[in-house]
Image (cartoon, rainbow, N blue to C red):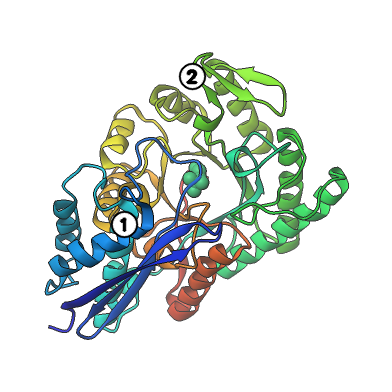
Amino acid sequence: MSSIIEDIIARKIFNNRGEETIEVDVITTNGFGRSSAPAGKSRGKTEVTYYPQGGVEQAVKKVDDLIAPELAGLNSDFQEEIDSTLHEIDGTNNFKLIGGNTAFAISLANAEAAANSHGLLLFQFLGGNNANTLPYPLGNCISGGEHARGKAPDIQEFLALPHGAETFLEAQTANTQIHSKIAETLKKKDKLFNGGKSSEGAWLANIDNETAFETIAKACEEVGNEMDFECGFGIDLAASSIWKEKEEKYDYASEGKKRDADEQLEYLLDLIEKYHLTYVEDPFQEEDFENTAELTKKARNCLICGDDLFTTNNERLSQGVKIGAANAIIIKVNQIGTLTDAAETIDTAQRNSYTCVVSHRSGDTCDWHIAHLAVAYKCPLIKTGVAEGARIAKLNELIRVEHFLGNRARMADLKVI
Ligand code: PGA
Ligand code: ZN
């Protein structure tokens, strides 16, 4: 068979923050795949462990000594078998022994090697002939929270969503224009603005939450008018990072205000109405399924998305589904470890009409695989920045996929909005 694994090679490389990460090559008789793992900064508590004790070096050693000999000779076509072998070798429930990022890199490199062995692109191999829908790009334009330092908004991300675009290229064009318009406004509103950007390429400015809202709202409206389609926007609160457990309050330090869960609910409903927000991620701390459900019930025409809430974990999603917590889910494969685990979660989400948002991490490499996952699994949204090397690698890959599909390409069906 042409897709039999002959060798697996691992090495240490670096992500866009200069942090060490793992890269893996999977070599089959007739194919090749390569993937490297990203890293989050505002991580969910229930994510799998990234690396074994000893970090990336130990992870590479585990691949050389333990994993490569075990996987050699298996057929890369059988992704589930590869991924369950990774679980067996690890033997823990959170990839503590080999590392979730090790599993991630092997799993994705294997999928690419299998596709390549058959002369197919990854999205074609995983998604089949019907995989022809492009996701809308959610583009982070202003950073705050744990992605910023000093005086900055408490809200982690202000994200453009050009949901009226007819093609992916148009949508990404709108996002780049919104992003650069925002810089022009920030120059005027923040005397100290020096063009600095966060890991995700979103602007860093000495502004409060309200200024950030006004700035992105104006940019989206102007670009929407110029391009003649609707450009909305949303936020990622990453609320666990502003949650003060002892006081049971959300700490909005830049406003000098604290809000309990009820006040947080009212605040968010007001914001959704005032700015017509189309997307709100992690509105409450990650164990608060109940208030997330309450917001989902009350918010109109808005995607309420769980990131740290679900951590791409099928069981946590199922818990959310039971009470109607959120109507969208972030899919970060390295939160759970393998492609098979993530695909199971996507399946549960889709069966329960949750919108899937395939996502980068703030620390990322030029790995482009998530672009193909969004198309293969028909995910209507991809969250991967606007303008920064590791983001552009994924966004440009989607432009290539759209070009490749030609007149078969469609934009995904984005519900709720
Ligand atoms: P990350 O955060 O730093 O964990 O990648 C991004 C997010 O919260 O969506
Ligand atoms: Zn998030």
Query: In whole angstroms, how far apart are the C-alphas of marks 1 and 2?
Result: 35 Å
Q: Amino acid at mark 1?
A: Gln
Name the quarter where the N terminus is drawn: bottom left
Q: Residues within 10 Å of mark 2 (few under 14, many from 20)?
A: few
Q: Amino acid at mark 2?
A: Glu
All told, the count of numbered labels is: 2
Q: What residue is rendered at 77% in x and 40% in y?
A: 206
Mark closer to the chain start, 1 or 2: 1
Residue 76, position as x, y percentages in the image? 19, 72
| Relative to 155, residue 186 above or below | below
Taking depth in this image into account, of 172 and 40 the one nearest to the observer is: 40
On residue 58, which mark appears?
A: 1
Residue 87, position as x, y percentages in the image? 18, 52
| Relative to 41, residue 23 above or below | below
Tell me, yes or no, if residue 129 can be seen here: no
Q: What residue is rendered at 21% in x and 42% in y?
A: 93
Which structural element holds mark 1? helix
In the picture of the structure, the residue carrying the numbered disc 2 is 245
Residue 262 is left or right of residue 115, and the answer is right
